[in-house]
Amino acid sequence: MDPRLKDETIVVPPTESAALGLGWSARLEPQPRGATLRLVHPEQGSFAVEIAITARGPVIRATSVSALELEAATEIHATCARFTVDAREAVTLRAGQITNEASGTFRAEGRAVEVDATAGDVRIHANDDVQVLGEQVLLNCERDAPMPTWLSGLTTDGAPAPRLPRQDAAGDTSLFDDLARK
């Protein structure tokens, strides 16, 4: 930043509104440090591009009541220390290929996390251990539907379930004896 601008207030002379057609007009509004270019429609609200001069340099802010779109024929590239997107409802990325890379930890978190391969494989590769933690880890199976609590202790025909001694249920009493000693 030019040190001569450190304490100066930048004054932008007011500009008359310019008609753009289809009901839209443009105004350049001076700000204490910078200016705001505002596109206004009497029925559709306004769209503003604000350039504010701050101690850290220019800040560019675009706001719209409808949508904000970026389009480039070849590439859109952003370089910054941190990149944050705050969406109230959803974020969607679409491409032939999406690559996520992190030089540190890559983390995905959500109330539920799903990974679906609609055609092809899902591969997990780790240089070290792969750890899967969960209440139950199900591989190639669906979780059995839980029995309703009101059926607890009943057979499918509604009769009380027979109670067998553990050795009769397992068939080998030595198994239980070995477990009891451990």
Image (spheres, grey):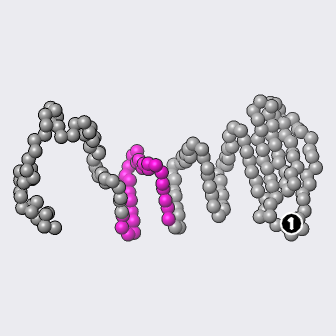
Rendered-image quadrant of the C terminus: bottom left
- Helix, strand or loop at mark 1: loop
Q: Residue at x 92, y 46 (%)?
A: 14
Work out whether residue 60 or residue 137 is closer to the camera in this orientation and state it.
137
The answer to whether residue 48 is left or right of residue 129 is right
Rendered-image quadrant of the N terminus: bottom right
Q: Quick check: 9 above or below 86?
A: below
Magenta region, main secondary structure: loop
Mark 1 closeness class: few <14, some 14–19, many ≥20 residues within 10 Å: few
Residue identifier under label 1: 6
Callout 1, which amino acid?
Lys
Q: Residue at x 13, y 67 (%)?
A: 181
Work out whether residue 121 or residue 167 is closer to the camera in this orientation and state it.
167
Q: Residue at x 39, y 65 (%)?
A: 126
Q: Position of residue 90 (x, y in %)?
A: 56, 44
Q: Quick check: 78 above or below 115?
A: below
Q: Residue at x 67, y 47 (%)?
A: 70
Q: Position of residue 117 (x, y in %)?
A: 40, 48
Q: Position of residue 20 (x, y in %)?
A: 84, 36
Q: Which range is magenta?
A: 105-130
Q: Quadrant of residue 84?
A: bottom right
Q: How many marks?
A: 1
The answer to whether residue 68 is left or right of residue 13 is left
41 in the magenta segment:
no
